[in-house]
Image: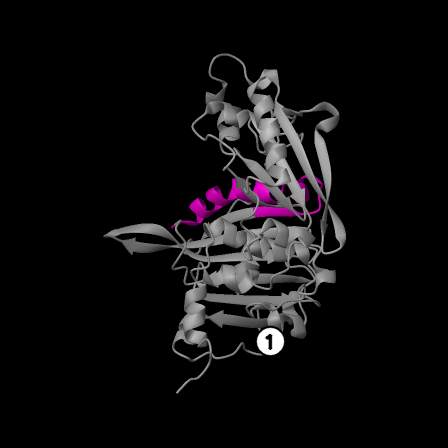
Amino acid sequence: MNNDIVPASLAVQAMRDNGYKNAAYAIAELIDNSIQAGASLVELLCAERRDLVKERVRPRIYQVAVLDNGKGMDTDVLKIALQFGNGTNLTPERQRGMGKFGMGLPSASISQCTKVEVWSWQDGPEKALYTYLDVEQIKKQQQTELPEPAPRQIPSLWREVSDNFGPTGTLVVWSNLDRIFWKTARSIIENSELLVGRMYRRFIANGRTRIVLADFDVDSPVLTFTPRDVLPNDPLYLMPRTSCPEPFDNKPMFEAWGGEHYELTYQIEFRGKKHPVTVRFAVAKNEARPGRNPGSLPHGQHAAKNIGVSIMRADRELELDQSWTIQYDPVERWWGIEVEFPPALDEVFGVTNNKQAARNFAEPVSWISISCSKVGVRYARL
């Protein structure tokens, strides 16, 4: 009889329902890890193959991989990389970046697939160390602990499709993708691009990290694909070069609003220390709203996908909170608000361990609520 408080096989199955909104949010957890490891290049590689579906051969997603050129992991770090609740950023003094909870890699992975494999190297990909987590084996109690990291050759498939296996890096591969809603590699790329561009807009815009997306067919006689760079997607539309369509692809569509109060910084005291929280406001330029129906223009349709208050933590967007908006009102797309806070205030804001939301943000008595309500009222009078 097993007297474990939480049987591993049942716990892992329950953890699969951990609340990721879709595959793009789960993939973002892997990108977080890459950026935290100092990667200047991150590739999202989506492989599909042709399956017989209802008597027709159709493309279907086969594997998803994230490759980076970060610092890689040694044996000790790789040992805990797939452990739930473990990691290298659990102590307060190390919680200054995106990582904190020790749940990202294993939790995000099993929310979309039943098997996740990790190769990581610090002295060339030929010396990569390998480990894995297999939900089906855990359910059958065939895997009761994580394998000791050991040398293993990186599959030739990934070496063929990417030229970016540098002296250090990590490759994460998802297989048996039973919970991904999008069924083709192309649909994963298309549905992830705008979200990834918004989440990591600062990293992309200032050149810290380049994020590349690519899909390919493993059944093709020749593996060919056209990678494309993710462009910043700025919901404040103050960045000069973004994914916004012409004529605002190379110039800001909005302007800072509020004069000297465009950026308000508050010092919030928590557990004996003060931490800055910054709120920024922007509204559309007149030239962005010509005629009677500017929302129907390509740039207006782009803005409609970025309605809400952008909540930023450690230079990465947690969510675009739409609780402040009337989504059917076409005017809502023509303003933007950004609220930024450090990881030290995670408890105050109620940051979830999957980094998808700040639960306490919409509390009506909060000082941020007052600030955002004020700008909403003022904009309504413009």
Which secondary structure lies at badge 1?
A: loop
Place of residue 217 in the rendered image (x, y in percent of width and height, measured from the top left): 43, 52
Q: Residue furthest front?
A: 365
Q: How many marks?
A: 1
Q: Looking at the image, which residue is at 51% across and 30% down?
A: 302
Residue pointed to by mark 1: 149
Q: Nearer the viewer, residue 251 or 1?
A: 1
Q: Residue furthest bottom?
A: 1
Is 234 positioned to the left or the right of 322 in the image? Answer: right
Q: Quick check: can you spot residue 247?
A: no
Place of residue 280 in the rendered image (x, y in percent of width and height, measured from the top left): 67, 33
Decide: is 307 above or below 166: above
Is 222 positioned to the left or the right of 236 in the image? Answer: left
- How crowded is the residue under tag 1: few (<14 C-alpha within 10 Å), some, or many (20+)? many
Decide: is 306 above or below 51: above
Q: Looking at the image, which residue is at 47% across and 43% down?
A: 191
Q: Quadrant of residue 377?
A: top right
Q: Nearer the viewer, residue 222 or 347?
A: 347
Q: Quick check: can you spot residue 105?
A: yes
Q: Quadrant of residue 237?
A: top right
Q: Amino acid at mark 1?
A: Pro
Decide: is 306 above or below 212: above
For the stretch drawn in magenta, what is the main secondary structure? helix
Q: Quadrant of residue 267?
A: top right
Place of residue 262 in the rendered image (x, y in percent of width and height, measured from the top left): 70, 28
Place of residue 171 in the rendered image (x, y in percent of width and height, measured from the top left): 58, 62
- Look at the image and say whether residue 350 sits in the magenta stretch: no
Q: Describe the colour scheme in one phrase.
A: one colour
- Quadrant into which the N terminus falls: bottom left
- Look at the image and say whether residue 211 sits in the magenta stretch: yes
Instruction: Give the residues in magenta.
Output: 183-212
